[in-house]
Image: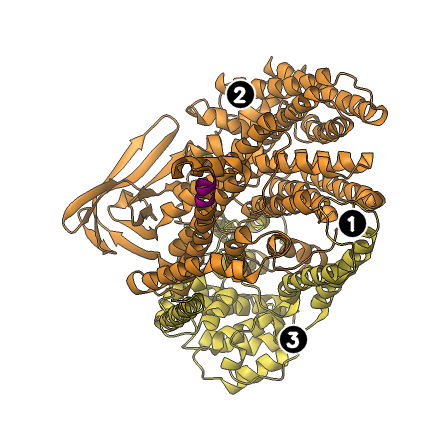
Amino acid sequence: MSDRARNIAVIVGMAAMAITLVFLVATNPSDVDRVQAIGERIKCPVCQGESIANSPSSMARDMMSLVSDSVALGASDDEIVEELLASYSGAVLLDPPVSGATLALWLAPIAALGTGALIIVWWRRHPGEPAEDTVRSTTSSRRLGPLLILGFSLAVIVVVAGFFLQDRSGPATGVADLAGQDLEDVSEETMEAVVAANADHPQVDGMRLALAERYYDIGDYSSAFPHYLAVAESANATGAQAVTALVRLGWMAWDGNAETETAIELFDQALAIDSASTTARYLKGLVLWCGAGEVDAATGLFEEVLAAAELSPEARTNVEADLAAVRDGDTCP
Amino acid sequence: MLAFLGSAGMLLAIVGAVLLVVRGVAAARHDTSPNLGGAAQLLLSGGAVAMLAMVLALLTDDFSLVYTANNHASATPFPFDVATAWAALEGSIVLWGLVLAGYTWFVFRRYRKSPDRLGAAALAVMGVVAIFFFGLMITVANPFEVCVQAMEAGCVRSSPWPFATVSAPADGPGPNPLLQNHLMMAIHPPVLYLGYVGMTVPFAYAMGALSLGVAGPEWLRRSHRSTLVAWSFLSLGILLGGWWAYEVLSWGGYWAWDPVENASLMPWLVATAFLHSGIVQQRRGMLQAWNFILVISAFSLTILGTFLTRSGTINSVHSFTQSAIGPALLGFLVLTLVGSFTLFSTRADTVATSPRIDSMVSREGAFLANNLLLSVYAFIVLVGTTYPLVLEAFTGTQVGVGEPFFNRLAVPLSFLLLLVMGFGPITPWRSAPPGLLWARTRIPGLIALAAGLLTALAVTRNGWVVLAVTLGVFVVGTMTGLLVEQVTARAAKTSETLPAALKQVVTGDGAFWGGQLSHVGVVLVAIGIAFAANLGSHHEVELSPGESAQFQGYTLTFESPFRQVQPSKTVLGARMTVTRDGNLIGLVEPSANFFGSDETGVSTPDVLHRPGGDLYITLLSTPETGSATFQFDTSPMIWVLWLGGLTTAAGGFLAMAARRRERSVTPDRQTVDV
């Protein structure tokens, strides 16, 4: 066989094998463990830098069982992630979206690769001396300087621009339209529209709750109220969502309208769903103390809260301060 | 008593470091050769005395030292009591100081043999770094503070003054439970520090060369050699860390893109880039400015890594409590960056221009691609690790950057690197004739594709695994082809036997073939990761004693719970038998360890090592109430990953040994282009 014929045979053989390989791999039935994959995208709230899929903590395992239930119920990845983020404070997405505040994070490596490639191309083209081993001359590393500075500035500009670039997509009206987006980047108007258009959608409660939380955070109780109420009464809401809604409603009733009894009743409802809810227990204690002057009941509740295992250090400090104050007979803050 | 000894050690070391700077600068400036031996000796013995005092305090349960009182318990068994010397912040700085003093001694030994201005300047730079670290020790991270107000177990108030009236507790709380669960804690930190701190040496030569204005080949030769030392230890240290995480942390993984893992990976990546680009400068005089940047970056990244993980800025398994060490390290980092880059830019005229590259299809071109990919890789890790911190500091927005981000970018980059690795070693310098490249790649290419096809048909059709196997076989294939080519050529020329020729070829260019062994190691790591990450399976089940569960062809039976009370801990565990096809293949005891008064147990997995892959069993709930929850994982082929890591490091050590031999046997060796 001539060299040429042999080369052709090799190329044909390679191509045939490569095509077969690509075909085999492409038709591989996906066996991705969705529960695990989703778990790896969420930071465990009580751990140090671990995802809920990798943490043995009980909260992470609770969250993982929620994920596996939701997967079994047919929820999409993004719906499950949204629900987890809405229901567990301190849970953070470990998979930053390619938009908003983390756009720059994704652009920076691309900018770096581009800058590096440009430097190499420039260096290749720039007329230097013919290559000679270990030749020394003293002209143009100074010329490389400005280029490096230029590249660096470019990267900085991209990073800064990323901070200010916002997602400018048009109004979306379906739950599915928002799939894959971080709810943080969706405007209130869009969320209102989606929630209104999908009032009966089984998965709307997560978004409703996120919207209500946003109003709540800025102190707009009257806008938040109908959404919390809808979640609290929704048959589709998960226990965690209902608890959050009831707790917020209770707090708004007391903080906004000084309705002590309504507030206590709402907290009790929340505790009936999740007897371990520390927020409900703590706020109930606070309202009993501040609204009804029931110092003993409040003391008991604060002590129960402190006995609970999962409490962030700040929360613990706050509750401890309140407990000390109520024991000393101070007026409530 | 030991507080005096330790403090005296720290002070001796500082005096030694100051002397080293003063005399080193004098020697470098006036080309005189004052004796630097006294200073280097003082530094080394000071560091050793400090470490000795620390270890003695731990071995003799001397709780009058705050460090012992708060990090040690009399029940802590050997060797964990010794390992406690670096298990907390202050002690880890003592280890850092000792390793730095040791490296300084090695730089001095070289200087003693042939004193020159570059060596003296480098010693002065080492002295400056040593002043900083021993300075940290006597100020913000003093390991020899004495306890002046004791608690039942531990200490509440301390004094840096060794003459203060001591009030020692009867016992201490013991080290972090996670750190006394595995023997690796005694080995992993020192090895890692040998890697980390070793990056100071190339930096010192680079700074020395720049200050003297002699940016010629000499600094590069020495920096390159010392980087090889640090890099080999760093590779080994990272491997041991991954192995520790796998054996101890009970989630079946070895790498989580945890900030402290990233902190060790960044200098490793940059040092790897320098190991390659340094060769380009040695052979072709190119990339001189770039090499300075890489060496400065590698050192700065070790300081940044230490800042990130030791300041409490980032919470992770490794970070210690918050202290004033954060600002100090950050200040030193800024000083290093500003100082070294200012020096670099003012001495840019002494750095030679890169001659023009003849062709991108050449060894130089492959090294350029390698450097681009590795630097971008390091940049991605850097950005991903620091972005959440910077964003929160400036805007208050909290974001998480975790595994999904890193995997998405690092995996494609790693495959590109493998591809370049397949071509680099077989590509000649200057310009590669296409015919030669084709001749050297066609057979390995065919074999690689066949291996990929075999994997897809017989093992798995998972794309990542198939790609890793195909590229891996290609890398090893082209390299083996090159070896065969050289051995047969030599045997034909010298009429040696093939084994003799093989020996001559490999020892003739030990640095190159050591590097190739590291390539094989990296290939094995890639294949191991691809298998373990894509083909593992995971199962959770609750069992009562006597019940069995099926998992991946194994039958696991929960035989009985057990409870052992040991001096330092209480172990609650489950005895399980594992059978496969009716044959008993192992007995496992996943457990939870409770140390002292600690109520949350540390889960300790049990791993059944099998040739096809490990069976990994973790206890999720303790079996006190009868039933227990178990987690089963399989890690297929994970031993390939460990073997690969060891091979990578071994390649580095081999190249190191070859260079030593070359230096002593043939000072002016002529290399032959391949």
Residue carrying label 2 = B55
**Residue under disc 3 on the same chain as residue under disc 2:** no
Magenta region, residue range: B488-493
Chain letter for yellow, please: A
Determine whether label 1 and label 2 are within 8 Å by CB: no
Q: Position of residue B264 (x, y in %)?
A: 57, 43
Q: Indicate the amino acid at tag 1.
A: Thr
Residue carrying label 1 = B353
Q: CA distance from mark 3 to mark 1?
A: 45 Å
Q: CA distance from mark 3 to mark 2?
A: 57 Å
Kindly report the secondary structure that dominates the magenta region of the rendered protein. Answer: helix
Residue carrying label 3 = A167
Q: Indicate the amino acid at tag 3.
A: Asp
Which class describes the residues within 10 Å of circle 3: few (<14), some (14-19), or many (20+)?
A: some
Quarter of the rendering containing residue B601: top left
**Chain B shade in the render:** orange
Q: Position of residue B252 (x, y in %)?
A: 39, 49
